[in-house]
Amino acid sequence: MDAGTELTRERWEANAAYWVKIIREGRDRYRTELTDDALLDAVGECAGLRVLDAGCGEGYLTRRLAARGARVAGMDICQGLVEAAAGLGGAYACASVDALPIGDRSLDLVVCNHLFSHLPDPSGAIGEFGRALRAGGRLVILTLHPCFYNEASERGAADSVPASRYFAARGIDQHFVVDGLESPSVITSWLRPLEYYSTTLRDAGFVITDIREPRPDEERLRTDPWWRAGFPTPLFILLTAERRS
């Protein structure tokens, strides 16, 4: 495990109890009111599919996919989150997405829910997903929007990302602040230009089949002050890619 990945793991271990509380009390409105539904819509019918929830956290998405009939396993590098997930039942493993303990061509679908912004270098994970997916298998990625996400975006900052920063990998160090609760440890959110994803996915045998930008509808923005303040620019992007070879 390289130094960057180890630092990420240590920070998530420090934040594990905090994150379990946030998720299980439904405090993250970005997820509960926007990105979860967008991701599940992109996944579509999944009954009987062999699914990996990569970067599963405390397992809520794994459980939702299982309830839809998927043969799903969750995987995360953070032992504290894996233990919390396993406490509610299901199949989980503590492992790095750079070295999946999964056989070649053994999966139909890989779901990455807010994973990629926490990978110092996603290329290894993309290569592993390509190895583990069958031909025709899909990879669904929900992550921060690299064109617009910036420091304090979730607190109303509407500054654009200048070209001098956009075209290089950039890390944003900040504490989670969700529903007034601040995380014990800082977390780095990593963002890369869109062409990085298209090139890296292509090199791993994928073709991008869909791009969506989850956003609240006009009525919600008009009537809910929280969303007006908390969604000043596009914050999320959802990519679906198919393994072609």
Image (cartoon, rainbow, N blue to C red):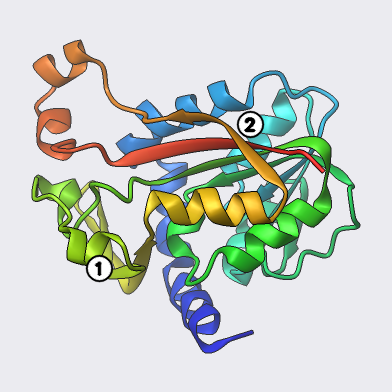
If you read the primary sequence from the N terminus, does the residue marked by circle 1 or circle 2 appear first? Answer: 2
Q: Amino acid at mark 1?
A: Gln
Residue 18 at x, y = what percent? 40, 61
Residue corresponding to mark 2: 64
| Residue 57 seen by the camera | no
Left or right of residue 162, residue 124 in this image: right
Residue 193 at x, y = what percent? 37, 55
| Viewport quadrant of the N terminus | bottom right
Q: Nearer the viewer, mark 1 or mark 2?
A: 1
| Residue 192 seen by the camera | yes
Quarter of the image where one finds residue 173: bottom left
Say above or below: 229 vs 130: above
Give the SS element for disc 2.
Answer: helix
Left or right of residue 86, residue 27 in this image: left
Give the SS element for disc 1.
Answer: strand
Q: CA distance from mark 1 to mark 2?
A: 29 Å
- Classify 10 Å Cα crowding around label 2: few (below 14), some (14-19), many (20 and above): few
Residue 100 got which mark? Answer: none
